[in-house]
Image (tube, rainbow, N blue to C red):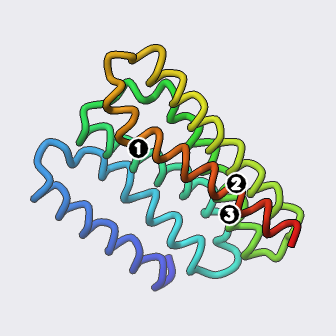
Amino acid sequence: MNRFTLGIVLTAAGLLLLALRYGGEDAWAAFILAPGLAMLAAGLAGPRSAAGLVVPGSIVSVTGLILLLQTLTGRFDTWSYTWGLIVAAVGLGTFLEASLMGDEDEQREGLRLIRFGLVGFAAFGLFFELLVYSDRLQGMVGWVLPAALIVAGLFLLRRKRDTA
């Protein structure tokens, strides 16, 4: 284990211990988030041979973030549509790894997966929040609708940049 990797492991372990100390019973998601962030950091900042850690690191990190938010909000029912964020995490990891390796075709594939995942998240989120969890209309307007508008805006911005 080189010095850089050891530094990442020690930092992640320290953050994990702090989360356990001060996070209470909601800190369990840190056991997923911390290793994901460590893999992501090692892949991004490490030697070129470590770039393969970026894809699993992004998947595990996004999964940890989802679980943390679900734990804090008590909304585990959102798994019915947050799977789209996992697909977007694969795309993000693919894009980042391809950027490190200088592979433009894989960068485009990563962006395609990000778009697909975010559109799936927004579309299924609207469907479930409006039709399945209809008694939660207030919650949908509070965060799913803004998220869908952000995704739509980013999609339009990306389209404009492609044609410019």
Q: Nearer the viewer, residue 109 or 151?
A: 151
Identify the mark nearer the N-term, 2 or 3. 3
Graded by Cα atoms within 10 Å as few (under 14), some (14 to 19) or many (20 or more), the crowding at tag 1 reads many
Identify the mark nearer the N-term, 3 or 1. 3
The residue beneath circle 3 is 52
User: Residue 162 location in percent, x, y?
Assistant: 85, 66
Graded by Cα atoms within 10 Å as few (under 14), some (14 to 19) or many (20 or more), the crowding at tag 3 reads many
Q: Quadrant of residue 78?
A: top left
| Horizontal arrangement in the rendering, residue 95 relative to residue 144 (left or right) | right
The residue beneath circle 1 is 66
User: Residue at image x 65%, y 40%?
Assistant: 119
Secondary structure of residue under mark 2: helix
Secondary structure of residue under mark 1: helix
Secondary structure of residue under mark 3: helix
Q: Inspect the image, locate mark 3, and give the three-letter code of the amino acid beneath it.
A: Gly
Q: Nearer the viewer, residue 144 or 52?
A: 144
The residue beneath circle 2 is 155
